Image (cartoon, rainbow, N blue to C red):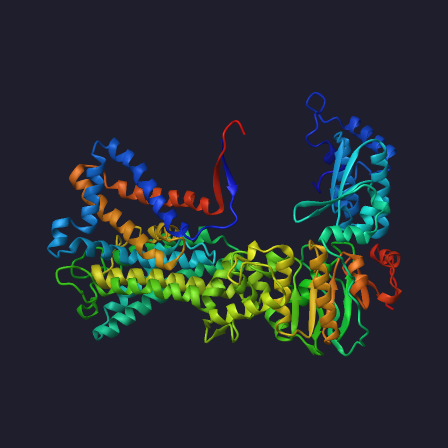
Amino acid sequence: MIRLEARSSTPAWFNLALPLAAILATLILCSGLIAIAGASIFESYGIMLQAAFGDLQALREGDFYAITETLVRAAPMIFTGLAVAVAFRAKFWNIGAEGQLLAGAIAGGVVGTIPMPGALAMLAMAAAGGIAGGAVALVPAWLRVRLKVDDVVSSLLLNSVVYYGLMALIEGPWKDPLSGYPISPPIQDSANFPVFLEGTRLHLGVIVALLAAPIVWFVIARTVLGFSIRVTGENPEAARYAGIRVERVLLSTALLSGALAGLAGVGEVGGVHYQVMSEISPGFGYSGIVIAMLARLNPLGVVPAAIFLSAVMTGSAAMSRATGVPTFLGDVIQGTALLMMLVALLFTGYRLRFSGAGR
Amino acid sequence: MPRLSVLDNLLVGMPGKGGRLDAAGGRQRLAEIGRSFGLKLDPNRLVSSLAVGEQQRLEIIKALFRGARLLILDEPTAVLAPQDVEGLFAALRAIAGKGLGIIFISHKLNEVRALTSRCVVLRHGRLAGDIADPAATAAREMARLMCGQEIVTPSRPKVTAGRVVLELDGVATNGHPGMALKDVNLAVRESEIVGVAGVSGNGQRALADVIAGMLVPTRGKLRIGGEEVRDRSPRGVQAKGLGRIPEDRLASGLVGALPLADSMALPRIGQAPFSRNGLLQPAAIADFATAQIKEFDIRCQGPQARTGTLSGGNLQKALLARELAFHPRVLIAAQPTRGLDIGATRFVHEKFLGLRSAGCGLLVISEDLEELLTLSDRIAVMYEGAIAGIVDAADATVARLGLLMSGARERAA
C-alpha cells in the first residue's frame, strides 16, 4: 500500500532536488517516445546535448557558438519566466505572457523605426515595450479586481486578441513597403542591439535578461512591494487586515509582470529579428509558465530553467535532423516537464508512506 | 440542507420503500423521538427558518433517527444562550437515560461538572487525567490537570475609566456574511474593558470588522480617540492608534507560510524601522521579533520559524506582541482565548488587565461569559445585530446576560 501523508515542513534541498527529479522523470518518459520513433535513446539525447551546448572538440577549440545560441533562445524565456513567476507569487494567474510579449514586440518595433541615436533608441524601445506589455497585463488584473472576472481565462484569451491584432497590422497598414511580405519594416540600424561575441548572436538583450533575474529576485525578496506581493499571494485576507491595499498590489504585480514579458518581445525585435513578424514567438510566453513552475517561482531559478527549455528546443531540432525523431518531441518534453513538476510539487506538502499488507 | 424541510433532511440517504421516500414512517419516528427524549421539531419547517439552537436539535435528532448508539458533541453550547443550555442538558440526560453513550467535548468546566458522569482531561494530545465523579471534583482541580499547574485568577486592580477612546455612533451595515449591524451605539473609555456578549452569529463579526476597518458601514460614525475616522480602511484605523486581535488568527492575523518575524512586522512593514525607502530591513524585522519572542515567551524555533508551525496559544501571543509593541490607545479583540489552554488564556487576560491599568481602552468580543465576567467593567449584549443592553459587570449575572442574549430588551444602564 502506498499512502500520501501530510508533511509539516519542507526540507530546503527540495528546491533543487524537485526540479531535477522532474526533469529526470521527463527524460525517462520521453525516451519511450524516442524508442517508438525507432532511434537510439542515448544517441538521441547525446545529439540534443551537443546541439545545445556544442561538441567537445568545438568547446576545446574555444567555439562556444552552440552555447550562445542556446542563451539567445533562453533570453526571451527568462523574461517570460520571470513575468509568470512574479505574477504567480501574488496568485495573479497571468497566462498571457505570450500576448504581452507580442505587445512589447509591436511597441518596440514601432519605436525602433524612429531615427534616434543608438542608446536612446534602445532605451525608448525597452520603455515602450515594457509599457505595452504592462498595459496588456493590466486588463485581466483590472477585470479581476473590479468585476471578479477569472484572470486565467481573460489573460489567456487576450493572447489571441493581441496576436490577431499583430496580424492585422502587418498584413495591413504596417506591411513592409519594400519587400511586400507580411512583416513590419525593419528598425533603424542604430537601434540594432550590439552583439558581444564576434561570430555569434549574443546580443545586449541576453545580458539584460541575465541581469533581470537577480533584480527581480531583489524586488520580490527585499522590497516592500515584493513583500506585499508575497503576502497577497499567500493570504489576501491577512494582507488586507494588515492594511495592505490588495487591489493595488495586484495591479502593480500585473504591470511588473506584463512589462517583463514585454521586454522579451523587445529583445527579440532589437537583438534577433530587427523587425516584427507573426511568428516572432514560438510560444515563449507559454514556455514561461513551465519555466516559472520548474523554478518554483524563484526568480533566480528561472535562469537555469529557461536554459534547460532552450536547450530542449534547439536540441530537438538537431535530433530530428540526425535521427528522424519528429521535432515535436521538444514540445512533448516541455509539456511533460510541467506535468512532472506539478506532480513533484505534491511532495512539498506530502510524503509517500509505503506500508506492508501485514500492518 | 437549509432549503429542505426538517423531514427531508432526516430522510436523506435513508432507505425508502420501493424507490420512494418513506415519509409516513419518518414522521412517526420523529414523533417517537420527540416523545421519548423531549426533542420536538415540526417536520414541515424549512431548515433555513430554524434558529441555530433548533438546527443543533435537528442534528441530534438526525443522529438518533439513524439509530446512533453513541453521540459525540463538540462544544455544543457555544451557539446557545445560557437558558437553552439547560434544555440541551435535559435532552442529553434523557438520551443517556435510555442507555445511549454521549461524549461531550467542552472547555467549560461547569458544564462538564453539571452534565457528565465521567470525565477525561486532555492536555497537548495526551490523557492528563481521568475523573470518576466530575460533579464532586472541584473546578480548580480540573483546571490544574488541564494546564499542569496551579491556576490563579488574575486580579483586577481598581482603576477609574477616563475619556472615551472608541465610539460607535448609529453604525449600521449590510452585505456581511452573518448578521448585519442595526444602529449600534457603543463607547469604550480609557482604562476600561467593555465586553461584548451574545449568542454566536448576532452581529459580533460585523462589529469587529467595522472597527478593524474591514467593513465599511452604510450609516453611522466611528470615532477613535475623540476624532472621527475618515479613512475607514485597516490602515486608517491603525493610524488612529487602534490595536486589533482578529477572531481567526491564521486566516486574518498572521500568514502561515511566512517566517514568524515577517508575520509580526506585517501591519507596519511599510514604516521605519521595518523598511526604509521601500526596501525591507531584515535585520530590524528579526530584531523586533526576537525581542517580542523573549518578552512574550513565544515558544517557537526562532524568528525565522514558519508561522504556521506555532501552536494556537503562541500564535495568539505573537499577535498580542505585534499589536502591543506599538502601544495602542484602544484594542479590539475578538474571541481572544478561543481554543487556548488555561495557561495561555490566563496570559492573555493578564495582558488585557495590564493594558487597562496602563490607560488603554479594550473591547473584548467573546462567547465565553465567564471570561467576560472576569475581565469586563461593562458588558454589552448583542442580539440580532443590535445592542440589546449594556450592564455593569458588578451587577451582571449569567442569568441576566442570558435573558438579554435571547432578546429580552433592557434599557442601557
Q: Residue visible at 28% across and 34% down?
A: A33
Q: Position of residue A111 (x, y in %)?
A: 27, 68
**Quarter of the figure with the C terminus of chain B:** bottom right
Q: Where is residue B195 in the image (x, y as percent from the top left)?
A: 78, 64
Quadrant position of the N terminus of chain B in the picture: top right
Depicted A305 relative to depicted B316: above or below:
above
Residue sitting at 18 percent across and 60 percent down? A201
Q: Residue furthest front?
A: B149
Whether residue A105 is visible to the viewer of this picture, yes or no, is no
> Between residues B219 and B35, which one lies in front from this camera angle?
B35
Where does residue B401 sit, x and y in percent of width and height? 85, 59
Quadrant for residue A84, please give it. bottom left
Residue A101 appears left or right of B318: left
Could you tell me if residue B208 is visible in this image? yes
**Residue B156 in the image, given as x and y percentages of width and height:** 80, 69
Q: Residue B271 vs residue B211: left or right?
A: left
Side of B239 where B276 appears, left or right: left
- Residue at the far top: name it: B18
How many dots with numbers?
0
Q: In which quadrant of the rendered view does residue B49 lie?
A: top right
| Residue closer to the observer: B79 or B156 | B156
Q: Is residue A312 above or below residue A35?
A: below
Instruction: Tell me if residue B409 comes above or below residue A8 in the rendering.
Output: below
